[in-house]
Image (cartoon, rainbow, N blue to C red):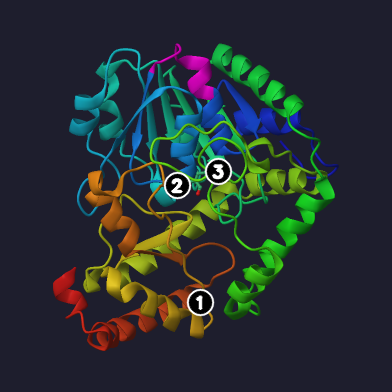
Amino acid sequence: MLAPWPAPGIAALERGYAEHCGVADAVVVPAVRSAILLLLRAALPAGGLAIGPAFTCLVVHEAMLASGMRTKFLEPEPKRFTPTATAIRAAAEPGCALVLSELYGIELDENFLRSLDDLSPALRILDSAMGIPRAERLREMRPTDVALVSFGMGKSQCAGGGGVALFADSALAARVRGARDAMLAESAAPSLLKSDLKFLAGLALRSRALVKHARTLRANIAPVPAPLASGTPGAASAPGAQRTWLSPEWTYQLSRAQRRLVARNLANAVRSAKLRREQAEVYLRCLAPLRITPGVDERSLPQSHFPIRVPAESRAALRASLRAQGFETGDEFPISGALRERDYPLALATSQEIVTLPLGEHVSTREIERLCGIIAAALRQIPMKVGSGSAQTAL
Ligand SMILES: Cc1ncc(COP(=O)(O)O)c(C=O)c1O
């Protein structure tokens, strides 16, 4: 059993994850984005095809492009988050790689995954960056499956950075471990103290006391840099551009304090997943009658954030009224710079309508019920204020 004291080394964390998840091997990675990049390069020949979702975290696209493979991004099913099996089958070719993102930790349905089995991809990435790994599920992985979990900020298994790749095939794990070591050796030595301080500042800005002021503080302390898509630092993003420069998040190394936190998170994983499931059920019960919960049901519950969809023109006002009452919300995920917007109307609409609500240890059931009450009241007011008609008809 993995203990947080003394701080476990990387090899001990990897053994702990592999054991907990009942998989052949685990590799600690700088981030899920880096794992996607390393996996595609390890499993595909040069010029191979990588297929992924259009609606996902934009760094997934950056990783796919950085791998140098050919890419195809698929629209989500209307009012859901992921592409259909039919769309994936139409795009696939023998020996391709599938990147399947589990948005907000909503596990992909087992029947959906089974329906893709006969495609025999060279690699299938179960991108569960936002989720909590579950042994019952991971034991079912096919040899070409690799599941990814992030330890980055805002994730269910947050330790301030890093992540883990879970393998059914030890030979592939060994190759990715070697490629990870080479990637870390090439990067500048990390400032572990700086990364700990950044992590603590990030946690403080998410705290109840500071949440109302977080935007101003963040802008003053560290202005958000423009997303980088390609070339040298600061290069403008262009749809489809290949990224050749990797910023520090791609080569992140866990500090001693963070390795302790990873071990603690793993020890709490089952409890945390149960808590988040119960919280998601409360959201669903309160918000489903408002018809703002497409893509979520009792069998597909999120773990990191609870996503709702509201008319795009109402979103800012709704988020502002929640912020004024001390609830910070998110808008994951903005449309990725890798896509030409007009080619992806469904991903674009999703990115403009989504609001993500808090889940996890820092929010109580009572607060969730209060938050749902504020949303219901706000949606009765906001559409009239912005003159866009009723939320109910727009949804
Ligand atoms: C589905 C998904 N994949 C990948 C990532 C990126 O994870 P990381 O920050 O560890 O690279 C995220 C981050 O939000 C995500 O939601």
Q: Amino acid at mark 1?
A: Phe
Alpha carbon separation for disc pair 3 and 2: 20 Å
Residue 280 part of the magenta segment:
no
Does label 3 or label 1 sit earlier along the sequence?
3
Alpha carbon separation for disc pair 2 and 1: 22 Å
**x and y percentages locating residue 64 in the rendered image:** 45, 31
Q: Which residue is mark 2?
A: 57
Q: Is mark 3 within 8 Å of ligand 1?
A: no
Instruction: Let me know if residue 309 appears in the view.
Output: yes
Q: Which is more foreground, mark 3 or mark 2? A: 3
Q: Which residue is mark 3?
A: 235
SS assignment at label 2: loop
Residue 327, numbered circle? 1
Contact, CB < 8 Å: mark 3 with mark 1? no
Which image quadrant is residue 375 in?
bottom left
Q: Which is more foreground, mark 3 or mark 1? A: 3
Q: Which is more foreground, mark 2 or mark 1? A: 2
Quarter the N terminus occupies: top right
Quarter the C terminus occupies: bottom left
- Give the extent of the magenta segment: 39-48
Q: What residue is shown at x 57% (from left), y 31% (from top)?
A: 244
Does label 2 or label 1 sit earlier along the sequence?
2
Tally the numbered discs. Answer: 3
**x and y percentages locating residue 301 in the rendered image:** 37, 54
SS assignment at label 1: loop
> Residue 204 or 275: which is nearer the viewer?
204
Q: Is mark 2 within 8 Å of ligand 1?
A: yes
